[in-house]
Amino acid sequence: MSSDPVISVRGLVKRFDGVAVLSGVDLEVRPGETMVIMGGSGSGKSTLLRCLVGSHRIDEGTISLFGDDVSRLDEAGLNTVRKKFGILFQSGALFNSMTIAENVALPLTEHTDLPREIIDIQVKIKLELVGLREHADKYPAQISGGMKKRAGLARALSLDPTLLFYDEPSAGLDPVTSAEIDRLIVDLTKKLGVTSVVVTHEMDSAFTIADRMAMLDKGRMLKVETREHFDALRSTPIDEAERLSRDDRLIRQFLRGDAEGPITERRALTNYEEDLLGELHANTTPRAPSIEATRTV
């Protein structure tokens, strides 16, 4: 297997309405590893995922997938690269009017010239990998949330990708089902040798599946390190934590889910400052009402 990174991100900047949501992000994902991208709400992890798959055009920097600079490709070029990876969406994103088997078959019917009997065999193989072969003829409304995730994963595998993206694979699942999805991700990585990028804020899941982990905060990439490194940081005693850098203390608070620390201190301070300064600098002109009257008295 090549030692060249499957994904290489350099100096990535993404802005919305002039505001940088990602600020100079660097990231490399190696062949065959599971990279977990984590961060709190608004940290930019979902935006990063959308940039990686080509849903968002970036403002600065480069994104390379399989050696191709996707930030410079047109839509046709992007579609060629997209056939090399699969995506498990947070909701599963199944078509409700199709059976599970038809959902899994869709990429094969759209992007290959395989005969119907070969597609049917491929669908059964993919459904067997995720433990859903006996449910092939059911519709999404007839299966549970965890089964929808597994069906979405089978569809993501339909074109035999070498790279898989997972968007919050454990979101909305009970602990047992979440653990089953985690085990499935690990098993598929070992059996198929795929490279996986998992966006999540579920720490139990992250530490179960990750080889390496990346921590985003307010659009900055704070750290990319091994699971063991983050586990040691999470386990740092409180008396030793005071000697850590501010970024490491922030990461430690996030990993542990502590109620006190740099994240909550910053949040409280920022909100208070914004409220005060907003009033000081507000225009003295009375604000227009949010709802205009439709009649006069």
Image (cartoon, rainbow, N blue to C red):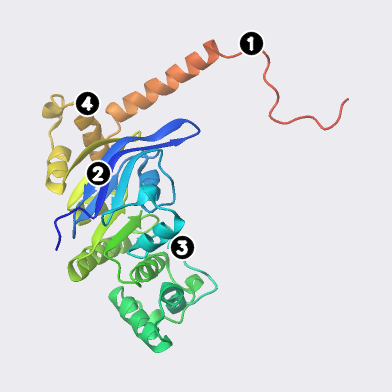
Q: Which residue is mark 3?
A: 93
Q: Is residue 146 left or right of residue 186?
A: right
Q: Amino acid at mark 1?
A: Thr
Circle 1 crowding by C-alpha within 10 Å: few under 14, some 14–19, many from 20? few
Q: Amino acid at mark 4?
A: Arg
Q: Nearer the viewer, residue 114 or 224?
A: 114
Give the CA distance from mark 1 to mark 2.
46 Å
Residue 121 lies, with reference to residue 196, above or below; the image says below
Helix, strand or loop at disc 3?
Answer: loop
Q: Which mark is residue 226?
A: none
Res. 238 image quadrant: top left
Residue 271 lies, with reference to residue 165, above or below; the image says above
Q: Does label 3 or label 2 sit earlier along the sequence?
A: 2
Q: Which residue is mark 4?
A: 246
The mark lying in front, picked from 3 and 2, is 2
Q: Which residue is mark 1?
A: 284
